[in-house]
C-alpha cells in the first residue's frame, strides 16, 4: 500500500493521478487540495475518502464543509491549510500539481515531514531550487519528476548513475504557433493559444507552451534536478511529441525515452518508482510513425526561452522574477487585459529593472514575487493579482 497526498487534485495532472489511483487500489488517497472547485472536490472526497482536504479559498472551504458534513473528513483552507495537507497526513508521498509559486511552502513542509515528492509543479523548482535540492538531501526525501521531459531524462539515467551527463536534449513540441513570426502573433487571442497540438493540460501551462516559456521553465527545472549547467541543455523541437527527451553521455551515446503523449506514464512512474506497472493506452507503432522530425527553437519570435537561460545564468532571485512576471502576464492575457506578445515583453521588462538578491530565502522569494507584480501593475496600469 502506498499513501498519497495530492495538491491540485481538480486540475489536469491531479485528475489523471486520481485515474491511476482508481486503477490501482493499493494507492490510497489520504489528503487532497484544490483552489476553489468544490463540486469536483466533493465527488473526489466521496470516491476516495481522504481524511484531510484543503480548499485554498476560505469561503469555498466553508461551503464544502457543509456539503460533506456526513463524512469523516476535515476541511482546512488558506496557505496554512495547504501546508497542513501536504505535511500532516500519514501519506508517504506528496504529488504536487498545483499551478504556480503557491507550491513552494507546502513542498518544503512535506519534505521536512519525511515525505517523498512527486513534482509536477515546476514553478517551485524554478524559484526555489536552491532551497529544495539541498533540503531533499538533508531530509532524505526523493524528488521524483512528473513533468514528461524530466521523467524521460530520469528514465534515461536509470542504470547510468555515476556516468556524467554530457548534454541533455530537452524536446519541445514548439506549440500551436511554431513557424509563425512576431507580426502573425500580435493578435493571438486566449482561445487560439489554449489549443495545444499534442497535450491536453491546464490553461496556464498551455499558454506557457505556446510562448515557449514552458520550455524555459523546464530548462531551469532540469538544471536543478539533474545538476547540469544551462550550456549542457540543448532544446530540440520535435513537433510530434514522441521523444520525450534524451541524454547524451560522455562517450557520445544518446539515450531517449519515447512513447505516445500521455501524462499518466510519468505520473505513474513517479508514484511507483523504480517499478513499472501496466498502463492501458495506445502504444507507439513504428510502422505508422513514418517520420520524427527535429528543428532548432525559434528564439527570435519566441524570446521567452532565451530569457529563461538569462534568468538562470543570472541566478539568485532572477528566476523568481522570470516566473512571477510570466504568472502575472498569463493571468492578464487570459483576462484579455494584455496582448500575446506582451507576455514575453513583461518578463523582459521585469528582469531588466530587478536588482538580484543572491541566495534568497523563501520570504525573499515571496517578496520578489510581490515586487514583480507591483512593478508590472504600475507599468501596464492593471490592478489584478
Ligand atoms: P490545472 O490548471 O489543470 O490545475 C491546477 C490545480 O491547482 C487545480 O486543482 C487548482 O484548483 C489547483 N490550485 C490552483 N491554485 C491553488 C491554490 N492557491 N491552492 C490550492 N490549489 C490550487 O494545472 P495542470 O494540472 O495543468 O498543472 C499543474 C502543474 O503541473 C503546473 O505547475 C504545470 O506546469 C505542471 N505540469 C502540468 C502538465 C500537464 O500536462 N497538465 C505537464 C507537466 C507539468 P481549482 O481547480 O479548484 O482551481
Ligand atoms: Mg513538460
Image: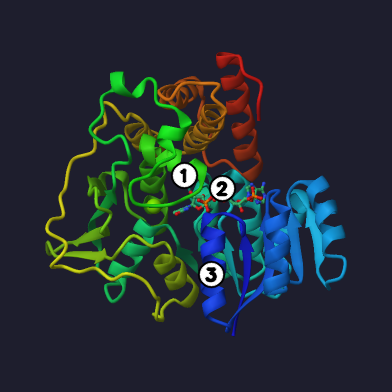
The vertical placement of 359 against 145, above or below, is: above
Q: Residues within 10 Å of mark 1 (few under 14, many from 20)?
A: some
Q: Is residue 115 left or right of residue 325?
A: right
Residue under the point 43% across and 39% down: 208
The answer to whether marks 2 and 1 mark residues whose Cβ atoms lie closer than 8 Å is: yes
Secondary structure at badge 1 equals: helix
Secondary structure at badge 2 equals: loop
Residue under the point 81% across and 69% down: 73
The mark lying in front, picked from 3 and 1, is: 3
Q: Where on the picture, by quarter, is residue 138?
A: bottom right
The front one of 239 and 255 is 239
Q: Can you identify the residue that label 3 sits on?
A: 19
Q: Is mark 2 within 8 Å of ligand 1?
A: yes
Q: Can you identify the residue that label 2 sits on?
A: 99
Q: Can you identify the residue that label 1 sits on?
A: 205
Is any part of residue 141 visible from this angle? Answer: no
Percent of width and height locating residue 216: 37, 41
Q: Is mark 1 within 8 Å of ligand 1?
A: yes
Distance in Å between CA atoms under marks 3 and 2: 19 Å
Q: Where on the picture, by quarter, is residue 33?
A: bottom right
Distance in Å between CA atoms under marks 3 and 1: 21 Å
Amino acid at each position: 500500500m502506498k499513501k498519497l497526498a495530492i495538491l491540485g487534485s481538480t486540475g489536469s495532472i491531479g485528475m489523471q493521478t486520481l485515474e491511476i489511483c482508481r486503477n490501482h487500489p493499493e494507492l490510497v488517497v489520504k489528503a487532497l487540495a484544490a483552489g476553489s472547485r468544490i463540486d469536483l472536490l466533493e465527488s473526489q472526497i466521496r470516491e476516495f475518502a481522504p481524511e484531510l482536504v484543503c480548499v485554498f479559498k476560505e469561503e469555498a472551504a466553508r461551503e464544502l464543509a457543509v456539503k460533506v458534513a456526513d463524512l469523516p473528513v476535515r476541511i482546512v483552507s488558506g496557505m496554512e491549510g495547504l501546508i497542513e495537507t501536504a505535511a500532516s497526513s500519514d501519506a508517504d508521498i506528496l504529488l504536487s500539481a498545483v499551478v504556480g509559486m503557491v507550491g513552494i511552502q507546502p513542498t518544503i513542509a512535506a519534505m521536512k515531514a519525511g515525505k517523498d515528492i512527486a513534482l509536477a509543479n515546476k514553478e517551485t523548482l524554478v524559484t526555489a531550487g536552491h532551497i529544495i535540492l539541498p533540503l531533499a538531501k538533508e531530509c532524505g526525501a526523493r524528488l521524483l519528476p512528473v513533468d514528461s521531459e524530466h521523467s524521460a531524462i530520469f528514465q534515461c539515467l536509470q542504470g547510468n548513475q555515476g556516468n556524467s551527463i554530457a548534454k541533455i536534449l530537452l524536446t519541445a513540441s514548439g506549440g500551436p504557433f511554431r513557424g509563425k513570426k512576431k507580426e502573425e502573433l500580435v493578435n493571438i487571442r486566449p482561445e487560439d493559444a489554449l489549443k495545444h497540438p499534442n497535450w491536453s493540460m491546464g490553461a496556464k501551462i498551455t499558454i506557457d507552451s505556446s510562448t515557449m516559456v514552458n520550455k524555459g521553465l523546464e530548462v531551469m527545472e532540469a538544471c536543478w534536478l539533474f545538476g547540469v549547467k544551462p550550456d549542457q541543455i540543448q532544446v530540440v523541437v520535435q513537433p510530434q511529441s514522441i521523444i520525450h527527451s534524451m541524454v547524451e553521455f560522455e562517450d557520445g551515446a544518446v539515450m531517449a525515452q519515447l512513447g505516445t503523449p500521455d501524462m499518466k506514464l510519468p505520473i505513474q512512474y513517479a508514484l511507483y518508482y523504480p517499478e513499472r506497472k501496466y498502463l492501458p493506452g495506445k502504444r507507439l507503432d513504428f510502422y505508422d510513425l513514418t517520420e520524427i522530425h527535429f528543428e532548432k527553437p525559434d528564439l527570435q519570435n519566441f524570446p521567452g526561452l532565451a530569457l529563461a537561460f538569462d534568468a538562470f545564468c543570472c541566478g539568485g532571485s532572477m528566476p523568481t522574477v522570470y516566473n512571477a512576471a510570466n504568472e502575472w502576464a498569463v493571468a492578464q492575457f487570459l483576462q484579455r487585459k494584455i496582448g500575446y506578445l506582451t507576455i514575453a515583453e513583461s518578463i523582459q521588462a521585469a528582469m531588466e529593472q530587478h536588482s538580484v538578491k543572491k541566495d534568497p530565502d523563501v520570504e525573499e522569494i515571496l517578496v520578489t514575487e510581490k515586487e514583480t507584480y507591483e512593478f508590472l501593475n504600475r507599468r501596464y496600469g492593471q490592478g489584478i493579482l
